[in-house]
Image: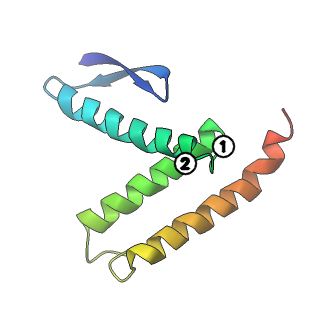
Amino acid sequence: MIHLDVNIMGMPYRLVCKEGEQKTLREAVAFLDGKMCALRDSGKVKGNDRIAVMAALSVAAEFLSVKAPQGPLSDMSILEVKQKLGDMHEALDHALTPQENLF
């Protein structure tokens, strides 16, 4: 196993992968870091947990639309996917706001 030291949104992480998978893992880290930084920099999403969840949802939606065009998202337009992601973001805001008020 190979240990990789990476940064995501400026935070260091030590990841493990199999020999020969380092390049793919680094590309995945760069992609995720880009998504998360874009969300953070937009100012629309606050809090690292919320940013991580929204980035994960965005990546999952992209993956599902490419990976399985005849899957559950096949009948949805990109506009509908964006609307669903927006609805999820709103639900997360509503659910996480009470937790943020504790700190």
In the rendered image, which residue does mark 2 sit on?
Answer: 53
**Residue type indicated by callout 1:** Lys
Q: Secondary structure at mark 1?
A: loop
Q: Which quadrant of the figure has residue 78?
A: bottom left
- Quarter of the image where the N terminus is located: top left
Of all residues, the one furthest to the bottom in this rendering is 75
Q: Residue 103: horizontal and vertical position, in percent?
A: 84, 32
Is 27 located above or below residue 22 in the figure? below
Instruction: Identify the mark at residue 46; answer none if there is no mark.
Output: 1
Which of the two marks, 2 or 1, is nearer to us in this view?
1
Q: Residue 99: horizontal and vertical position, in percent?
A: 80, 43
**What residue sits 32% from the left and 58% below the top?**
63
Q: Residue 17: horizontal and vertical position, in percent?
A: 26, 26
**What residue sits 26% from the left and 69% below the top?**
68
Of all residues, the one furthest to the front in this rendering is 42
Instruction: Identify the mark at residue 98; answer none if there is no mark.
Output: none
**Residue type indicated by callout 2:** Val
Q: Nearer the viewer, residue 95 or 77?
A: 77
